[in-house]
Amino acid sequence: MTTSTTFYTKTDYDKICEFAGSHFEYDDGLIVWKYNGQVIDDEILTKLLNQEDIQIYLEMATHKHSIIINNIQQKLMLNLNLKLFRVYGSTPNIFIIINGKEKIRIPDVTIAPRKEILNENNHLTNPLVIFEIVSPSSVQTDYIDKLREYKALETLQEYIIVEQDKNCLVHYQRVGATEWTEEKIETEKDFLYLPTVSVKLQMQEIYADCEEL
């Protein structure tokens, strides 16, 4: 299988996602698989742009991955001031410019202000808090690539990476224009505090119903 040699626009990306679902992200003219970051073949992308039904392999989120996302969303919805904030799961697309390159990411959970700011393609530009649940193939992407990219978002205040194979998360918090703190939380009875939105999440709540999976 060859890799893409074609430059795709953000409009091309949106058209593909509208037809085939939010399985893809945008990397400065390239369209990549969401869960492993690999560039998608031009032949596949052409067929998707033409809205042809084709059989393609999609690396999907695990059942545990989905449960953790649902747990986080539910607790945020119960505890956030919804007059001030919005909660999204696997939407919306986040638009990032880093080192002159355009990126579109789809975090697992996003908190944004009620007065969200969208660009011309309706991609969110002012997220406040982002969660990513680590998949086996996304360790490099979540801990290195996305960490660097999300830190470039001027509005972002907190980034949380949640492991799914063990009770462990890493909480990055902005403390200056370019300075961030890093805290690892591994104790089951401990909690994650999100000062940006004044919400506390128990580790037991985040990993509820995951024990037997």
Image: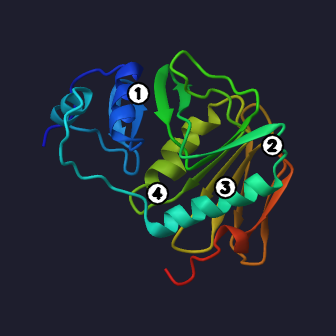
> Residue 139, labelled with which disc?
4
- Which residue position holds label 1? 14
Under circle 4, the secondary element is helix
Colour setting:
rainbow
Label 3 to label 1: alpha-carbon separation: 24 Å
Q: Position of residue 188 (x, y in %)?
A: 72, 78
The first of marks 4 and 2 along the sequence is 2
Structural crowding at the residue carrying mark 4, measured as other residues with C-alpha within 10 Å and reported as few (<14), some (14–19) or many (≥20)? some
Q: Quadrant of the N terminus?
A: top left
Mark 3 residue crowding within 10 angstroms, few (<14) / some (14–19) / many (20+): some
Q: CA distance from mark 3 to mark 4?
A: 22 Å
Percent across and percent down for residue 68 are 59, 64
Whether pointer 3 and pointer 4 mark residues with C-beta atoms closer than 8 Å, the reply is no
Q: Earlier in the sequence, mark 1 or mark 2?
A: 1
Camera-side mark, 4 or 1: 1
Question: Mark 2 Cα within 10 Å, few/some/many (few <14, many 20+)?
Answer: few
In which quadrant of the rendered view does residue 8 lie?
top left
Which residue is drawn at the image coordinates 80% and 35% (left, top)? 176
Circle 3 — which element?
helix
Q: State the CA–CA distance, disc 3 to disc 2.
A: 13 Å
Which residue does the numbered mark 2 point to in the structure image?
Answer: 82
Any mark on residue 140, and which?
none
The kind of residue tagged 1 is Asp
Determine whether label 1 and label 2 are within 8 Å by CB.
no
